[in-house]
Amino acid sequence: MPLSQFLASFRHAFEAGRLLKCTLGKPTSVAPDDLKNVYLRPVALKKGLLIAFNYRYKNRDEVKNYDLNESLEHLETMLGKEFLNADLFTPDRDFSLSFSKNGEPVLSSKKASHHIAVDTSHDRIKQRLLDPAAPWLHALGITSANGTVRSDAQDKWRQINKYLEIIESLLRECPLPPDARIADMGSGKGYLTFALYDFLKNRMGFTPQITGIELRPKLVELCNKTAQSADFQGLQFISQDISEFQPERLDMLIALHACDTATDLALAAGVRNKARIIIAAPCCHKQIRKELHTRNELAPVLRHGILEERQAEIITDGIRALLLEAEGYKTSVFEFISTEHTAKNVMITATADEKQQKRGDDRRREALEKVAHLKAGFGIKEHYLEGLL
């Protein structure tokens, strides 16, 4: 059988130290949502030689390491069901496995396309989207004078780089004009605002106009001075309530860690100004927690305060996503960065979706019906964003 032969070739390549990489593509409807590809390669760890599975989702990567037998079990489960194509690369020969629409597998091979040595290193050099030697990073306390990331700023540095990876992915899905107008609502000390400007200007070649909106005047003053010293002419910070911000044009709206209903104010501003991309990392989910009076089968579970609190966060952000979908956006809710680095780790992204918008009233009605069902089940009168919209 072609699948058995492919798996045998995989086993032989790994055991002989000849496995370069293996890629899975052409996901089916059975594959997890937003999973695009899976990349496999050998990796040397303390436990021995394992196989790293890099699950490539639309907005993130997840890596899991398995031994040979576990890897073969996962491959056998996924191939022909979740993925219809697989390519195995060795220094000797390439193998390709494909499945037709009716599930028939076909195995082929050809001369090797890669003649490089097998790389099993765990810590590959990762191409950063940001230069750690950027002066503004030192001005904001992320790096030392010589451009080295400070030990007490490692978590912030990881967060910055993960943020830019997400931005890069969103721009591939939903391109913005080179002179993009962007608002960062609740910009704080501006770490991510500066990173975004630097990335768009110096890596993407944009000429963006980014406005950081922050209530605390001292932070606004610090950020404006830093922007001037970095010669970031298209970056400015203003001291203003986000509800009062009325731009002439808005292509992207960002609201990271805006407290409770401030996130909703920001999301509503993005919708009202027809922003093509909206990014939010909510925190302090207080509004729904106060209203929650569960009337469904979860009531016995949610009598425990900590479980009710977590459920309130899920409901709050789930309804936010549905309300954005009702307005014609395609949404994703995912882990921004591991809880190992920050507790505020949920991110909502929304991109203007032409297919959704063409469905018009049908799409809106479906989303709002789901919102109404959730509200009824959890005894919620109104989500704050619902009222704003």
Image: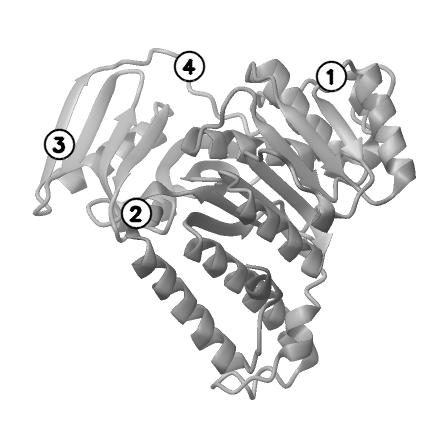
Residue type beneath disc 3:
Leu
Q: Are marks 4 and 3 in contact (CB under 8 Å)?
A: no
**Image disc number at residue 117:** 4
How many labels were placed on the picture? 4
Residue type beneath disc 4:
Ala
- Residue at 51 percent across and 52 percent down: it is 333
User: In this view of the protein, which residue sits in the foreground, 281 or 151?
Assistant: 281
Q: Are marks 4 and 1 in contact (CB under 8 Å)?
A: no
The residue identified by callout 1 is 233
| Mark closest to the chain's N terminus, 4 or 1 | 4
Tell me if residue 294 comes above or below residue 201 in the rendering: below
The residue identified by callout 2 is 358
Element on which disc 1 rests: loop
Query: Residue 85 occupies which quadrant of the picture?
Result: top left
How many angstroms separate mark 4 from mark 3 (CA)? Answer: 25 Å
The residue identified by callout 3 is 107
| Mark closest to the chain's N terminus, 1 or 2 | 1
